[in-house]
Image: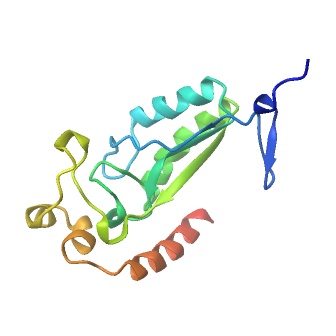
Amino acid sequence: MPHPLLFTPITLRGVTARNRVVVSPMCQYVSVDGTPTDWQFVHFGRYAMGGAGIVFGEETAVEARGRKTYHCAGIWNDHQARAYRRITDFIKQMGAVPAIQLGHCGRNAGSHGAMQEWKALDERDARNDVSFAGTTVTGFGVAVSATLFVRDSARRAM
């Protein structure tokens, strides 16, 4: 009896996954200044250990002012990229393919997380955290943000 298709390898654009089980992105809201923590290491690593073929990390902001919350993951600097490297290396060691969902919340970016009932940011928050002030409080243009993202992300990927 042949294996069900779900458990057979699949190749997409030159990347082969051991099976077609894909763990979709799940926001964790536990990053520190956008940097993934041991929480993400364990959370995503366990799916790779369990046999998933592709493991997506959570939605990851491309710049600080594009996060949904203060605790959302990001990949706008080298420190964050290094922290993700630890996670992706482990996922690969376990035989899975690491993947990422890039995100930017545009003008709607910025709220407190689930522990604070998704309370909207206000002027007081803007005074305490400049990274959100441009988007949330004053309405910084998304087109400029997208241009900076493409430029900066391309440099980091090289």
Residue for point 26% across, 66% down: 131
Give how far across and how far down residue 70 sits, in percent.
26, 53
Counting from the top left corner in percent of width and height, residue 115 is at 21, 39
Above or below 115: residue 147? below
Instruction: Say whether residue 157 is left or right of residue 131.
Output: right
- Quadrant where the N terminus is found in the figure: top right
x, y percent for residue 58: 47, 46
Q: Residue visible at 34% across and 59% down?
A: 67
Residue 46: where, in percent of width, then height?
54, 26
Q: Is residue 29 above or below residue 4?
A: below
Measured along the vertical axis of the image, is residue 157 above or below residue 97? below
Q: Residue 136 appears in which quarter of the rendering? A: bottom left
Residue that sits furthest to the left in the current view: 124
Residue drawn at x 55%, y 42% is 24
The residue under the point 36% across, 64% down is 66
| Horizontal side of residue 112 vs 93, given as left or right | left
